[in-house]
Amino acid sequence: LEAAKQVDELAPLINETIQVNYAKASDLATLIKSKEKSVLSSRGDVSVDQRTNKLLVRDTADNIDAIIALVEELDIPVRQVLIESRVVLASDKLTQELGVRFGMSATSTTGAGVATTSGSLTAADSFNQFATTPQLPSRLNVDLPAITAGAGSIGLAIARLPFGTMLDLELSAAQAEGKSETISSPKVITANQQEAIIETGTEIPYQQAASSGATAVAFKKAVLSLKVTPQITPDDRVIMDLVVTKDKPNFANQVLGVPPIDTNNVQTQVLVDNGETVVLGGVYETSKTHNTERVPFFGDLPVIGVLFRHKLEQNEKSELLIFVTPKLLKDNITL
């Protein structure tokens, strides 16, 4: 060993330029010069030309041969993977509503009539031999109609009471069904063990207090995003660290003009075969709403109490599913 060391110390030094094609020359230089596994002799040195991505090596011939072999082994194209995902949001909504309006009107002069039972509608004015004025909607004293858009209704005068008083009734009902399915398909290509992020959506502005006491405008993201870091195994499988987020502004529940953000998020690590689709997870949500408005006392009466009530029922179901498919790419393959 001592003789070999002496020969190495006496061997002439030569210069060699090594072109690095796929890796970073600076990374390889750090590896070559590492103290633990250095392939340089005690007299050797390596530097990097950043512009051309070349290694400039000065060492003995044997050590330079070892460095060239190491570079050829490590300087290979990085494998790439296409990550395709599908975010499916399905919802089903059913609304049923039943309402009633009725009232009494008299043949008195304008402005006379019975008092209003509920609401703010005026009592009936008058009617003559040709037509009753005002029209039916303005003579209904119990005002609890169905408010769903497109609700059907039927109104009629059901009785003429003594002293010329008329009893008017309007029944309204509605049933609405809605189904929707939203499919988002973000996909992105990234190199092995390199994080990739893709997102699309909007930013919601809102005001917040600044340190000076004034107000400033800030923004909150409401986006569909996919963040993934893949690792390709030797047997062509893919380990993925995934974060999938689907946010949307909820304009129905605004606070001071700023909508809250409904968030759905999945964060996980999975091992998947090349081209195989995996379901990351799902969220199933059911919402039931029962709302009843009534006239005090009268709405609680048996049988006829239905004439003093407004009933609304809503059933809503939603489901979120997230599918991910990794596909290993050959050279020159793009989206």
Image (spheres, rainbow, N blue to C red):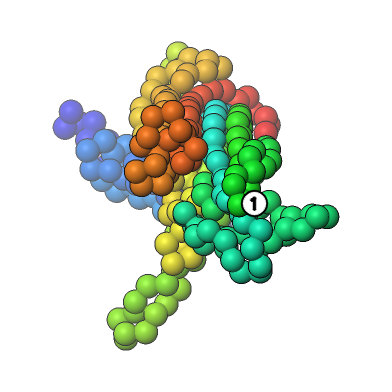
Q: Is residue 250 above or below residue 292?
A: below
Q: Position of residue 21 (x, y in %)?
A: 56, 40
Identified at 51% across, 49% down, the residue is 142
Q: Position of residue 91 (x, y in %)?
A: 54, 30
Query: In the orientation shown, which residue stands out farthest toward the front?
Result: 163
Identified at 48% across, 15% down, the residue is 273
Q: Quadrant of the N terminus?
A: top left
Q: Viewer-proximal residue, 189 or 261? A: 261
Identify the secondary structure beneath mark 1: helix
Identified at 37% across, 34% down, the residue is 301
Label 1 environment density (alpha carbons within 10 Å; few <14, some 14–19, many ≥20): few
Q: Viewer-proximal residue, 229 or 221? A: 221
As shown in the figure, which amino acid type bears the numbered disc 1?
A: Gly
Q: Position of residue 299 (x, y in %)?
A: 40, 40
Count the numbered circles shown.
1
Query: In the orientation shown, which residue stands out farthest toward the left?
Result: 2
Instruction: Tell me the residue that label 1 is attached to.
Output: 164
Let me know if residue 314 appears in the view.
yes
Q: Quadrant of the C terminus?
A: top right
Q: Viewer-proximal residue, 27 or 94? A: 94
